[in-house]
Image: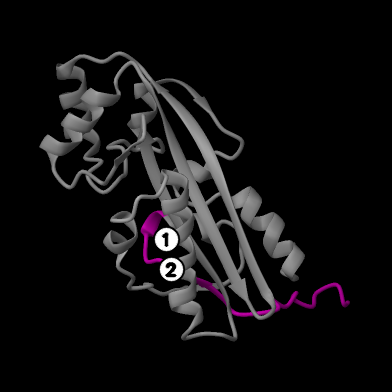
């Protein structure tokens, strides 16, 4: 291949999400992509008696399939994340009061962040997930309220932003891919896309 000849992607790349966090992450890899909202009913999956890991994996697959049905020529990435504390799923709080309530439950304890990914492309179907264990400090009510007012983590599962000042809430984080916390494990994703034929 010529020195200056650009490498070609095997399929158009689509992120089955309009999440700004996942979009920023995927853009780090340098492959051009399109973001399409999957328009799936997440509550339908969450109603079933499934483990947090199963919920994340089912939702990632559902999102990827919804977009792949419209774009079967493409490589579609679906991802979902579940924050779980002792088996209880912690959703996006949506309000300051709910965020404070969630963080009060979590202080001094550890919880899991499970990120699942499905990749669908012509003749390819790949599923994987990543688990991060986060150990939160013992925090006072005032400290939690001050954090929430500063960072406003109202659209984040678990009510914190690790990429911002939320990192101060934790004593220890056990992980093998820091990008998984934000919503898309880039190391595992790159490994799989290279196998499909995307150029490094």
Q: How many marks?
A: 2
Dot label at residue 87: none
Q: Residue furthest left?
A: 97
Q: Quadrant of the C terminus?
A: bottom right
Q: Quadrant of the N terminus?
A: bottom right
Secondary structure of the residue carrying tag 1 is helix
Dot label at residue 63: 2
Classify residue 113 by image quadrant: top left
The answer to whether any part of residue 23 appears in the image is no
Per the picture, the main secondary structure of the magenta-coloured stretch is loop
* Residue at the (36%, 23%) spot, across then down: 168
In magenta, the rendered stretch is: 1-21
Residue marked by disc 1:
59
Which x, y percent locates residue 97? 11, 35
* Residue at the (44%, 34%) spot, across then down: 112
- Of residue 31 and residue 132, the one placed in the foreground of this image is 132
- Classify 125 as above or below 98: below
Residue 95 located left or right of residue 153? left
Classify residue 123 by image quadrant: bottom right
Which x, y percent locates residue 142? 15, 18
Which x, y percent locates residue 128? 60, 53
Label 2: few (<14), some or many (≥20) within 10 Å?
Answer: many
Label 1: few (<14), some or many (≥20) within 10 Å?
Answer: many
Please report contact status of discs 1 and 2: CB closer than 8 Å, yes or no.
yes
- Classify 178 as above or below 187: above
Secondary structure of the residue carrying tag 2 is helix
- Of residue 65 and residue 75, the one placed in the foreground of this image is 65
On whether residue 8 falls in the magenta region, the answer is yes
């Amino acid at each position: 291949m010529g020195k200056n000849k650009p490498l070609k992607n095997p399929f158009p790349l689509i992120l089955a999400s309009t999440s700004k966090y996942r979009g920023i992450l995927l853009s780090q890899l340098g492959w051009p992509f399109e973001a399409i909202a999957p328009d799936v009913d997440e509550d339908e999956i969450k109603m079933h008696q499934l483990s947090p890991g199963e919920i994340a994996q089912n939702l990632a697959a559902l999102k990827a399939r919804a977009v792949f049905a419209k774009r079967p020529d493409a490589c579609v990435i679906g991802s979902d994340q579940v924050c779980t504390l002792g088996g209880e799923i912690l959703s996006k709080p949506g309000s300051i009061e709910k965020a404070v309530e969630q963080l009060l439950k979590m202080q001094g304890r550890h919880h899991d962040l499970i990120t699942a990914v499905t990749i669908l492309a012509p003749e390819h179907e790949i599923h994987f997930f990543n688990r991060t264990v986060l150990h939160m400090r013992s925090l006072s009510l005032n400290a939690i309220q001050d954090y929430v007012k500063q960072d406003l983590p109202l659209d984040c599962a678990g009510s914190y932003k690790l990429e911002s000042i939320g990192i101060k809430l934790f004593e220890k984080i056990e992980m093998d891919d820091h990008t998984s916390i934000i919503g898309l494990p880039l190391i595992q994703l790159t490994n799989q896309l290279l196998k499909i034929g995307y150029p490094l």
